């Protein structure tokens, strides 16, 4: 590691759970972020700051004024720019050492499977169920972990899925079927820092998967309600009738 890298990442290296090896694992990681909105912004910025070496950013939206109340990877100067290019600019300003690949597309299962070679993990920062099911199925097909996140109103949740772990539940175990009539932020609003809290937790779980610090969290669902000020952790288990997990063996 170069001298300026030892300085930049010194507060990571000081952590005995990370040390130099942990930081090198972070720098060797390739993270795919699906969605560069409210959740994707803190995920992209924290993971770039942390030194993740390579990113694939996926989002077909452009920056709009209504985004700027919470999507902190974008700003007034990047209005109308694609969100992936806008986020890339912010990430490189934070840390010019990272490599960022931009894909202004709407991902589906086929696209994901074509682009997941060499990817360490995916982070779900999308706002719709179709993409989450596509990510779930691609993660199972490619045997890579992913961190799901959602936030709306005053509440949010994070779940970690890792098909490499034995008997690990998948997203379809948690939600066998979910229609898109679940409320989105565009329809019901969201308190600005709620996406920051959930995105920061997703970043933490991504770094845990990369460096293996602390207790494994795969198969856990964390929920947060800002109105009640309440965090909860739920242990998920594999659903016997899950169409995905039945196929694993
Ligand atoms: Zn399952």
Image: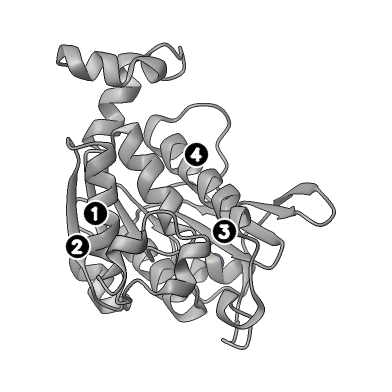
Residue 204 got which mark?
A: 4
Q: Quadrant of the N terminus?
A: top left
Q: Quadrant of the C terminus?
A: bottom left
Residue 24: x, y in percent? 25, 25
Residue 102 got which mark?
A: 2
Q: CA distance from mark 2 to mark 3?
A: 30 Å
Residue 152: x, y in percent? 64, 68
Mark 2 or 3, closer to the camera: 2
Residue 88 got which mark?
A: 1
- Per the image, label 1 sits on a secondary structure element best described as helix
Ligand 1 closer than 8 Å to the CB at disc 4?
no
- Per the image, label 4 sits on a secondary structure element best described as helix
Who's the residue at 67% across and 55% down the image?
A: 236
Who's the residue at 28% across and 21% down the image?
A: 8
Residue 107 left/right relative to 17:
left
- Per the image, label 3 sits on a secondary structure element best described as loop
Mark 4 or 2, closer to the camera: 2
- Residue 119 visible, this orientation: no
Q: Which image quadrant shows ligand 1?
A: bottom right
């Amino acid at each position: 590691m170069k001298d300026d890298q030892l300085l930049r990442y010194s507060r990571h290296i000081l952590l005995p759970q990370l040390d130099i090896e942990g930081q090198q694992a972070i720098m060797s990681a390739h993270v795919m972020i699906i969605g560069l909105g409210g959740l994707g912004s803190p995920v992209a910025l924290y993971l770039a700051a942390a030194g993740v070496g390579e990113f694939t950013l996926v989002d077909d939206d452009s920056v709009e004024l209504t985004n700027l109340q919470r999507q902190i990877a974008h700003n007034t100067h990047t209005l109308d720019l694609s969100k992936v290019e806008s986020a890339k600019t912010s990430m490189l300003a934070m840390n010019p050492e990272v490599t960022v690949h931009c894909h202004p597309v709407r991902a589906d299962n086929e696209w994901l499977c074509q682009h997941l070679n060499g990817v360490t993990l995916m982070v779900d920062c999308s706002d719709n169920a179709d993409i989450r099911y596509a990510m779930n199925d691609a993660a199972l097909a490619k045997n890579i972990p992913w961190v799901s996140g959602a936030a709306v109103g005053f509440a949010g949740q994070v779940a970690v899925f890792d098909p490499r772990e034995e008997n690990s539940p998948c997203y379809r175990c948690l939600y066998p079927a979910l229609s898109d009539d679940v409320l989105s932020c565009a329809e019901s609003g969201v308190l600005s820092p709620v996406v920051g809290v959930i995105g920061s937790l997703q970043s933490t779980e991504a770094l845990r998967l990369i460096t293996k610090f602390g207790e494994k969290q795969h198969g856990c669902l964390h929920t947060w309600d800002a109105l009640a000020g309440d965090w909860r952790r739920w242990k998920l288990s594999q659903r016997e009738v899950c169409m995905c997990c039945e196929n694993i063996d």
